[in-house]
Image (cartoon, helix red, strand yellow):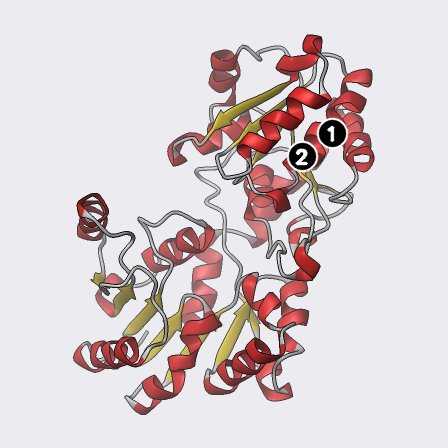
Amino acid sequence: MDKTLIVTNDFPPRPGGIQAFLHNMALRLDPEQLVVYASTWKRGREGAEATAAFDAEQPFTVVRDRTTMLLPTPRVTRTATRLLREHGCRSVWFGAAAPLGLMAPALRQAGAQRLVATTHGHEAGWAQLPASRQLLRRIGESTDTLTYLGEYTRSRIAAALTPEAAARMVQLPPGVDEKTFHPGSGGDAIRARLGLRDRPVVVCVSRLVPRKGQDTLIQAMPRILAQVPDAVLLIVGGGPYEKDLRRLAAETLTHRAADSVRFTGAVPWEELPAHYGAGDVFAMPCRTRRGGLDVEGLGIVYLEASATGLPVVAGDSGGAPDAVLDGETGWVARGDSPMDAAERIVTLLRDPQLRQRMGERGRDWVEEKWRWDLLAERLKELL
């Protein structure tokens, strides 16, 4: 493989799904043939120390820009072209097509022979607005390949591109580390710690924001408890919606059922597999908001839950259904319907054999299609 320059605003130690995606891919490329040009995580001594410590542990070269938000400005473009030439890179991977892919013509002129740009959920939003739609079209014309997460994002983004650029799109979703997320991930210890050892647990692992649908699950709990009285909803993660969710739980549940919704807050990454494993069912009924601008790109949490051996109940937002084999690894429910979510969850909680069958199918599907090593080989071919 020719030497590659990754240009990205999203890279650890900054937390997030795109960051994890890029880092996992980078670790599976030849470190001697890789240079990463990324933003600085955050200003101040603490941010600088955390970034420097992370970069020192990487097997490849990381160059940090002084800015905390890498945008295709003339200065950043000059820096990227300089790095391309200094390190002899022949290919470029833009970690997020919009807006960094606007630098593609300058990098092509500087000697890049292959330009690949990855799209996520937000580019589907760009495709809906006239001004950003034109910018997305320019990015498609000036790169060799735009990658997409799933069929939902492909169809939305392709509508903004020229037919030639749309035909060059290739699927490149994030993967799952099947060795980290697996049925024996330590869920029993989490259950014991939280006092949930013998109770049916519905687990939701996600950032706490309105789109993810934790409020739908809370509103579904009275219906669930009417048929599975000892059930517990375990909400794992932190975020700006937490205060509202706690208030909703207090308003929705009687005092007697108050312990049926548990919040863990943010948990360390290394404990996430065990928190998935603490559940009997995984549910995140995400929904589309803001007229389609706030939409789920894929929903890697469903695949991590499947790898852990859990059946999943997904929402119908954007590309979330692409991460579920409906009726095989779980079900897709209406993200705005507590009744729909409750019906699916109750069916699973009351049928251990169905849970086992769907969980096993999900695990097999992850191993067949969603392993990081398989997806990294696809990226190598594109570069």
C-alpha distance separating marks 1 and 2: 6 Å
Is 169 placed left or right of 230 in the picture?
Answer: left
The tag on residue 219 is 1
Which residue is pictured at 32% across the width and 74% down the height? Answer: 1
Left of 40 or right of it: where is 239?
right
Does residue 137 appear left or right of residue 30 in this picture?
A: right
Amino acid type indicated by mark 1: Gln
Q: Are marks 1 and 2 in contact (CB under 8 Å)?
A: yes
- Image point (34%, 50%), residue name: 14
Which amino acid, mark 2? Asp
Q: Position of residue 376 (x, y in %)?
A: 43, 61
Q: Residue at x 36, y 71 (%)?
A: 71
Q: Give the vertical position of 18 relative to 379 (above or below).
A: above
- From this viewpoint, is residue 3 visible? yes
The x and y percentages for residue 13 are 31, 48
Percent coordinates x, y for residue 2 in the rendering: 30, 77
The one of 294 and 170 positioned closer to us in this rendering: 294
